Amino acid sequence: MSIRVRNLAFDYKDFRLRVADLGFERSRLTAIVGPNGAGKTTFLKCLGSLLPISAGAVMVDDRDLVRFKNRERARRIGYVPQEHGSVFNYAVLDFVLLGRAAHLPVFAMPSADDERLAREALDYVGLRMFAERPIAQLSSGERRLALIARALAQATEILLMDEPTTFLDMKHEVEILDLVRRLAREAGKTVVCTLHNLDMALKYADTMVFMKAGAVLAAGPPDSVLSEALLERVYDIPIRILAVDGRRVLLR
Amino acid sequence: MTKRTGWWTLLAVLLPLLILILSLAVGSYRIPPKDLVHTVAGLISPSRHPDLPPAYKDILLHIRLPRLLLALIVGAALSLSGAALQALFKNPLVNEYILGISSGAGFGAALSLVFLGRGFPPQVAAFGFALLAVFAVLTIAGRSESSVVPLLLTGVVVSAFFQALLALVVYFASPYALQTLFFWLMGNLALATWRDVLLAGPVMLAAAGVLILLRWRLNVLSMSETEARSLGVHVRREKILVILVATLATAAATSVAGIIGWIGLIGPHLVRMAVGAENRRVIPLSAAFGACFLMLADDAARMAVSFEIPVGIFTSILGIPVFVYLLVKAKKVWL
């Protein structure tokens, strides 16, 4: 399943987002990067029809996303928010089970099958032991995993993730991004995530979309997108790209 | 979760029934337990026990039973509406009283009683003005409706407005209507008749049924709007559905029993303390708790002194400290 953006426009107060033409392929991890306020999260939400675009279209399998019913869309596109902030402290399994809402009518109860799928999603992210634990008792990193598990229980081919690693230490950052990459490469999903950490984007992303001030400056393989000239132009500080152990890293 | 739910469901059905039966013995006219059993048995097979005073039958059948049934249904409906609204607004402090629903319904029902008389069902105006009140609150609070303070403040303001209108109606009421109004306003089940049960009961039961069917969906609706949308929810439509149904239940309850506040707060809160926040459990158990609580509160109101105390006063005296406690200890995460 692929996503294609055509002349997308989104306006909110003074903020303008314009993306002329951009595609996201399956089995690939695409990282949307750029400075604060570039519109990364806004763009991600437009891709999932979580914000109403003012012009243009997001096409999923050649069909305009606005023509999808809510549930139909939610069976194709999963969204992982940055943080979970419900006041109600559900058990982790009950929380992950919410992903099944996309497959159930309004008045239905989740079945034993739905519960099995939720448990499988927990297994996949390594939270099996936490199923009965109240979600507020999880660490920040574990809560991110629970959010990802909920999107997996939703069983969508497209996954949109908003900054899956902010506020995590380096170990958890790497673990989550390993998992995210597996979802693209092994499970064959179309994964799009916003990332503020360019080093991690360089390491993990198959495709990089570089944004600034509501516009896409460059898109393509990370190596070709990131140049010292572009980085200095965008961030206003000198940044060097070095090769270390066969990998490229940023020095600022 | 499945295993545990079975026991809770059983309790949710049996406990209110048990309290209903025991409460039949409570009242100013003392009926010995043995005679009570015989009277009930006599109702089932009239040929036996013909020697009991006919007053027993009248008291049980025409005074106590409709009153208890009404207490059961009203308590369940109010508590259930509270639980559903709390999930919907992602805020355990919300209840039908805070959202202005009770005051709107109270004004509507009073208006109907005074100007259209007792012959016209007061539920209609109660529902109309309750809806007006809740949508006024939501419109004024605007986008900030999931944050606590603006919503509570707006609720207070709108409630105050409808209470002023209510005072105006009371001011213009005839002395005869005034007496009825006075008792009813404080939240009272003493005037309960079979007509009330038959008129408002089905409405409350239907609304409760819808909310019970939506119990798992309420978990989904308790997520942020963006999350709920990403999970496939038509947020606006389902939100309006829950508000309509909860308002309908509250308006029907208010129109027969007056303003009985705070059950929608105490019930769900205590249930969450016992079994956690999961609404597949919270919703049915809140209904059961509300039913038991109002029947017991009404028993207490009947037994406490030789004259009757309006039960609404009881529930407020118990409910407001609970609310204050929650307000003080309110944290980001709830149970």
Image: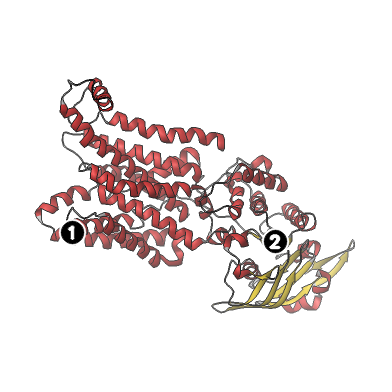
Q: Which mark is residue A158?
A: 2
Going 59% across and 74% down the picture, which residue do you hit? A53
Q: Distance between the residues labelled 2 and 1?
A: 59 Å
* Callout 2 crowding tier (Cα within 10 Å): few <14, some 14–19, many ≥20: many
| Vertical side of B86 occupied by A3: above or below | below
Mark seen at residue A32:
none
Asked if residue A35 is positioned above or below residue B238 in the image, the reply reads: below
- Label 2 SS: strand
Q: Taking B153 as reference, is A187 left or right? A: right
Marks 2 & 1, CB-CB < 8 Å contact:
no
| Quadrant of the snapshot with the N terminus of chain A | bottom right
Q: What residue type is labelled 1?
A: Leu
- Circle 1: element type: helix
Is residue B188 something one can see in this rendering?
no
In the picture as drawn, the residue positioned furthest to the right comes out as A246
Can you identify the residue that label 1 sits on? B116
Q: x and y percent of residue B186 in the render?
A: 22, 48
Residue at 35% over, 45% down: B263
2 and 1 marks on the same chain: no
Q: Position of residue B88 (x, y in %)?
A: 46, 55
**From the viewer's perspective, is B73 left or right of B111?**
right
Kind of residue at disc 2: Ile
Of A109 and A243, nearer the camera is A109
Give left or right: position of A135 versus A244: left
Figure quadrant of the C terminus of chain A: bottom right
- Say few, some or many: other residues with alpha carbon within 10 Å of mark 1 (under 14 / 14 to 19 / 20 or more): few
